[in-house]
Every structure is written in C-alpha cells, then in structure tokens.
Image (cartoon, rainbow, N blue to C red):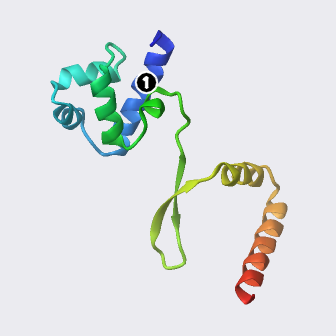
Amino acid sequence: MNREERSAFALRLRTLRKAAHLTQGEVAERLNIHRTAYTKYETDRANPDKTCLVTLAELFGVSVDELLGKEAPPVIVTLQDAMDTVVAVELTPREQAMLVAFRSLTDEQKEQLMKFSGDLVNEDAEN
C-alpha cells in the first residue's frame, strides 16, 4: 500500500471499529495481538498481514477489498417504519440516485413528489 492508501485504510479501520462499538483493546484481543500493535494500524504506522486483514474484514462484516478501499461500501440508512420500529436498510444504487435527485428539488417540488409517490403506493394497495 502506498502512503495515501494506508491513510485511507487507517481511517476506514477506525470508522468501522467505532461503528461496531469496540475499543482498540477489544479488536486487538480478537486479533490476538497487543493493543499497541493494533493502534499502529489505525494511526497509519504499520500494515496488518494478510491473515490479520481477513480477520478484520470478518470482524467488521466487510470484504477485504472494501476494507482496503477497492470496493465501495454499501450505503446503510436507519429508518423508522409505520410501527415505530427502527430498521437499518441498505440503499441500492438506484435508491441512492433518487435521494441525490430528491435533495436537489425545491421544497415545493419535494412536496409534489411526496404526494405523487403516496398516490402511487395507495394505487398499488388498491389493486
């Protein structure tokens, strides 16, 4: 890995660890290494070996390619459904594009789109 790739890896690693609500010590324990060795990965002072990369990917539920930045991570959003249940949903590329388009609309256009989409949903429910 070159310097730029290592820095991006270190940031991804730290972000994934924090999202998993784990400490550096807990991750190091799962890797069977000392905490200071793991800290070097997150601070861009060392690179993990291949076995460690695989274990990290498994621990964080991502591919090694994603961990190394060679594959875009999925976009995950948290939504609240009609029953007030919070669910995590992975957005498809098409849904991501729709969200980007939606954000570019005026408030009035957003309201029109929301009404139209509600009409479509109700129409489907009636059929």
Q: Is residue 68 above or below residue 120?
A: above
Q: Position of residue 34 (x, y in %)?
A: 15, 24
Q: Residue furthest top?
A: 2
Q: Is residue 27 above or below residue 119?
A: above
Label count reads 1
User: Which quadrant would residue 72 be assigned to in this image?
Assistant: top right
In the rendered structure, which amino acid carries the disc numbered 1? Answer: Phe
Q: Is residue 77 left or right of residue 7?
A: right
The residue that appears at 33% across and 40% down in the rendered structure is 58
Q: Position of residue 101 (x, y in %)?
A: 77, 51
Report helix, strand or loop for mark 1.
helix
The residue that appears at 83% across and 68% down in the rendered structure is 112
User: Which quadrant would residue 111 be assigned to in this image?
Assistant: bottom right
The residue that appears at 79% across and 74% down in the rendered structure is 115
User: Which quadrant would residue 114 be assigned to in this image?
Assistant: bottom right
Q: Is residue 118 above or below residue 34?
A: below
Q: Residue furthest bottom?
A: 126
Q: Position of residue 14 (x, y in %)?
A: 37, 32
Q: Is residue 102 above or below residue 7?
A: below
- Check disc 1: other Cα within 10 Å, few if <14, some if 14-19, many if 20+: many
Question: Can you identify the residue that label 1 sits on?
Answer: 9
Q: Position of residue 55 (x, y in %)?
A: 28, 34
Q: Is residue 31 left or right of residue 70?
A: left
Look at the image and tell me in which quarter the N terminus lies.
Answer: top left
Q: Nearer the viewer, residue 64 or 19?
A: 64
Look at the image and tell me in which quarter the C terminus lies.
Answer: bottom right
The residue that appears at 77% across and 83% down in the rendered structure is 123
